[in-house]
Image: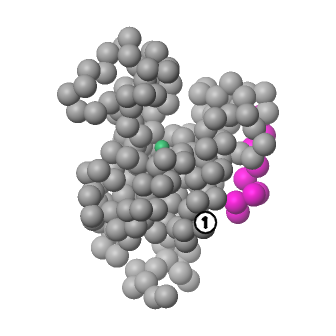
Amino acid sequence: MTNPNSFEGRPEKQARWDGRYIGLAHHIAQWSKDPRAKVGAVLVQQRFSRIVATGFNGFPANVEDSAERLQNKARKLQMILHAEQNALLHAGRDARDCDVYVVGKPVCNVCATLLIQSGVRRVIAAAPRPGTSSYWDQVGLLAIEMMREAGVEFVPISSAQLDAIGLNRDEARAAEDPYAARQGVFDFGLFE
Ligand SMILES: [Zn+2]
């Protein structure tokens, strides 16, 4: 399988562009009004270094994102679109063969089904932690299982890449996940 714009054999180029898009996804995540989790996604056609679409988590257009709704966690989850979903909807068929960069949460099981079915070829996102009781870790592991099975490459964001955008993984996790503060250490080794 040949890919004309493959990063294969060019790890420095890959690292440079991955870092740029991770930083952009982190920037876009800050546009989310979700008080607990701000997530950004960037869909990129690597062949032309073209940003196809971006997204952040939020309610559908013209649905009022009032503080009351956003602070009611159960209600919010019933109404919110994930960053990946917004990016895919904006991209339409152009999502095919794109890479997606996601910052803020691991990719969930639902987003994984949509990314696979949209023809996304590579997913760069936080690695979920095995063995925790965190919902996001559990659905994140299922997402990775499906992506692997479907031949979608999963690339975990490294702690060095998070440091580069000023986002300390442990601090970010602790802020949004009560289990993180207790467990403290994250297993990067599993996916590297
Ligand atoms: Zn999701």
Q: Main secondary structure of the magenta part?
A: loop
Single out the residue that lies furthest toward the top.
Answer: 68
**Taking 82 as reference, is 7 above or below it?**
below
Q: Is residue 177 magenta?
A: no
Single out the residue that lies furthest toward the left.
Answer: 62
Task: Say which residue label 1 marks.
Answer: 148
**Taking 67 as reference, is 93 above or below it?**
below
Q: Is residue 185 magenta?
A: yes
**Image quadrant assignment for residue 153:** bottom right
Tell me where residue 89 appears, x and y as whole percent: 29, 50
Image point (50%, 25%), residue name: 36
Q: Is residue 60 left or right of residue 109?
A: left
Determine if residue 27 is in view. no
**Image quadrant assignment for residue 192:** bottom right
Q: What's the residue type where badge 1 is placed? A: Arg
Tell me where residue 182 appears, x and y as whole percent: 78, 27
Image point (59%, 27%), residue name: 176
Frontmost residue, 56 versus 142: 142
Span highlighted in magenta in the image: 184-192
Q: Secondary structure at mark 1?
A: helix
Q: How many marks?
A: 1
Q: Is residue 47 left or right of residue 37?
A: left
Image point (61%, 44%), residue name: 139
